[in-house]
Image (tube, rainbow, N blue to C red):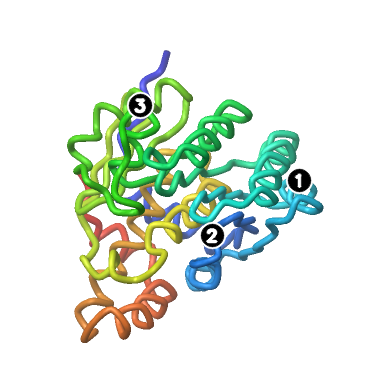
Amino acid sequence: MTTPAPVTPQDLGEALAALRDGAPLVQCLTNIVVAGWTANVLLAVGAAPAMVDNPHEAGEFAAIAEGLLVNLGTPYDDTAAAMSLALTGAARARTPWVLDPVAVGALEWRTSLAHQLCDESRPTIIRGNASEILALTGGSGGRGVESLDSPEAAAQGAMALADRHQSVVAVSGPTDHITDGSRMVRISNGHPWLTRVTGGGCALGALMAAFAAVVPDAVVAASAATATLTVPADSAAARSAGPGSFSVALLDELALIQPADLAERVRLS
């Protein structure tokens, strides 16, 4: 078996160029708190969002979309049914999909739903904070959407989860950890205000779906999405007074970031 090549900063810049050229259509079955913000982030980087999350249309649309996000932030019976239908449509069309297992672990229904969705269709990428990722390996989860664990503490669990599902697992935190079970990419950009704006992590999951639509290597896709959110966050924080102005500046910086700039500024190891 050929060992995959290491991920380089140039790979991430090329991935951003591919996203801008391709403008992928991303279907988001996401939570009601962050839908508008997620759509704006996708638009800012050059992707096309579609918030089609009802059971009448979700499966049909997933066969049209180029990337799919399934986010468990505010699941309802109808949206849970739509998620399963979307996975069926995505599998038929070979549409890559991202699972964001928001707040799994402490809440039984959404935890069982996350496992059910993984069993129904192999996720291309699983993205969560450290406690959410550990919860999928049998841990207790965090405090709501807040992680009680560090990405470093979740690294081995993330590698095991990636092996189990043959997926890429991305653990968000001060240093993001992204693994396919053999490679481990660490990205150390970003600013604490990303955690003070509702939907920072949720938007990251949508970005991963957008990059997975145009980049065959899911480790590169997840890494490029992470860099594309966190490198502009550094610039946005430098010219902001707090989380409010930061969120506006972040959208501007997402639109302005260039592939060469991304490759130069990403702190990757």
- Viewer can see residue 4: yes
| Quadrant (top left, top right, bottom left, bottom right) of the N terminus | top left
Q: In this figure, which residue is indicated by the disc labeled 3?
A: 138
Q: In this figure, which residue is indicated by the disc labeled 2?
A: 31
Q: Amino acid at mark 3?
A: Gly
Check disc 1: other Cα within 10 Å, few if <14, some if 14-19, many if 20+. Answer: many
Which secondary structure lies at badge 3?
loop
- Nearest to the eye among marks 2 and 1: give it: 2
Q: Quadrant of residue 105?
A: top left
Counting residues from the start of the chain, the first of labels 2 and 1 encountered is: 2
Where is residue 206 shown, x and y percent of the image?
50, 56
Counting residues from the start of the chain, the first of labels 1 and 3 encountered is: 1
Which secondary structure lies at badge 2?
loop
In depth, the one of 67 and 102 nearer the eye is 102
Write the residue at 45% across / 44% down: 101
Q: In this figure, which residue is indicated by the disc labeled 1?
A: 59
Cα separation, mark 2 vs mark 1, equals 18 Å
Q: Tell me, for residue 73, which label it has, or none.
A: none
Check disc 2: other Cα within 10 Å, few if <14, some if 14-19, many if 20+. Answer: many
Check disc 3: other Cα within 10 Å, few if <14, some if 14-19, many if 20+. Answer: few
- Nearest to the eye among marks 1 and 3: give it: 3
| Quadrant (top left, top right, bottom left, bottom right) of the C terminus | top left
Q: Is residue 169 above or below residue 18?
A: above
In depth, the one of 108 and 121 nearer the eye is 108
Write the residue at 59% across / 41% down: 96
Q: Amino acid at mark 2?
A: Asn
Cα separation, mark 1 vs mark 3, equals 30 Å
Image-based side of 115 in relation to 242, left or right: right
Where is residue 149 shown, x and y percent of the image?
21, 42
Where is residue 166 shown, x and y percent of the image?
47, 24
Cα separation, mark 2 vs mark 3, equals 24 Å
